[in-house]
Amino acid sequence: MPSNEMITGEYACLVNHFPPGGACQPEPISELTTSAHCRVTIASGHKAYLHSDPAAASLIRPVILRTQSLDEFKSWMSVPDEVHRTHPAEMEWEIPSKPWNGRLIQKQDLDSEERTALDLAYYAYVFGDSRRVESYREILENCFAPFEAAVYKASRVRIEAHGDLIVQGCAAILEFDDLIINAGGRLILNTPCNAAIGRLVKHPAPARSWN
C-alpha cells in the first residue's frame, strides 16, 4: 500500500497491502474472527477512529487476537521470512549490533542499552526477516507477551474529501473489501498495521486549470 499524503501517520511505513491471491499474501486472518462485514463512510471534514480500547469510540468494533508466540504474531502482521528473501523490502530494518546476551529477565530489569536492542530486534523480527535476530525471540516473548492485534473488518470503507480515519491502540489488521479515499481524505496510522485490501481506489484532486 503506498505511503503518501492519503495514507500517513507515524506507522505508515509498516503497512502491507496484499490483494487477494497476491504472491506475498500473508496467512488469512478472516478464519480467526467473527466480526461482521459493514459499510462505513467518513464524511467530509470529519474524523473517525478505529481503536482497540473498548472504552474508546471506534467506528468498527474490533476482534482482539492475543498470543504468547512472537512467531504467531508475526504471521498476523507480516509475511514469512522466505518472502523477505525473495522479495526484498524497500526498508531494511536496523538490527542490534550483537546477538542477545542470554539474560532471561523481566522488562523492568532491562538497562537502557538492552531496551534499545530489544526495540530494534522487535521491529526487525516482526516486520523483517526474523532470522537476522533469532537470538532475541525468547527474551522478546519473555518481556512483551502477550502480543495483541485488533482486527477491523468491513465490506467498504469510504473516506470523503478532507475526512480522516485514524487507527490507534494496539497493532491493527485491516480487512476491507473496498477502501475508497477521495481527494483530501486520509487514512492515518498511529499504530503498526497490516492491511488486506481487496480494492484500493484513490481519487486525487483534479488538476488545476491555468487560465
Image (tube, rainbow, N blue to C red):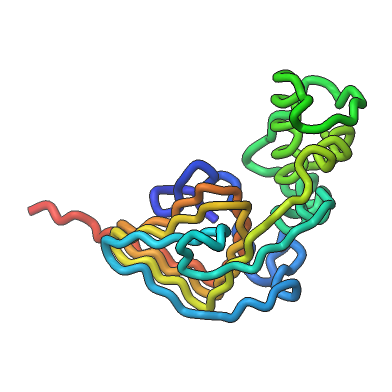
Percent position of residue 131, x then y: 86, 39
Image: 193 above or below 158 = above
State the count of labels: 0
Q: Which quadrant: the N terminus?
A: bottom right
Height in image: 24 above or below 119?
A: below
Residue occupying the far right of the picture:
102
Q: Where residue 162 appears, x then y in whole percent?
A: 29, 58
On screen, 148 above or below 62?
above
- Residue drawn at x 67%, y 57% is 149
Q: Where in the figure is residue 19, as x and y percent of width and height?
A: 62, 67
Which residue is the extreme one toward the front? 55
Q: Is residue 16 visible?
A: no
In this orientation, which residue lies closer to the viewer: 142 or 15?
A: 142
Q: Is residue 123 left or right of residue 164?
A: right
Where is residue 128, by image quadrant? top right
Q: Is residue 10 visible?
A: yes
On the image, which quarter does residue 160 sit in?
bottom left
> Which residue is rendered at x = 77% and y = 64% of the image?
27
Near-viewer residue (13 or 138): 138
Residue drawn at (51%, 47%), measured in percent from left and top? 190
Residue plotted at (60% across, 48% down): 192
How far from the left and from the top, in percent, is residue 113?
A: 73, 19
Q: Residue 94 vs residue 2: left or right?
A: right
Q: 198 or 133: which is nearer to us?
A: 133
The quarter of the picture where residue 26 lies is bottom right
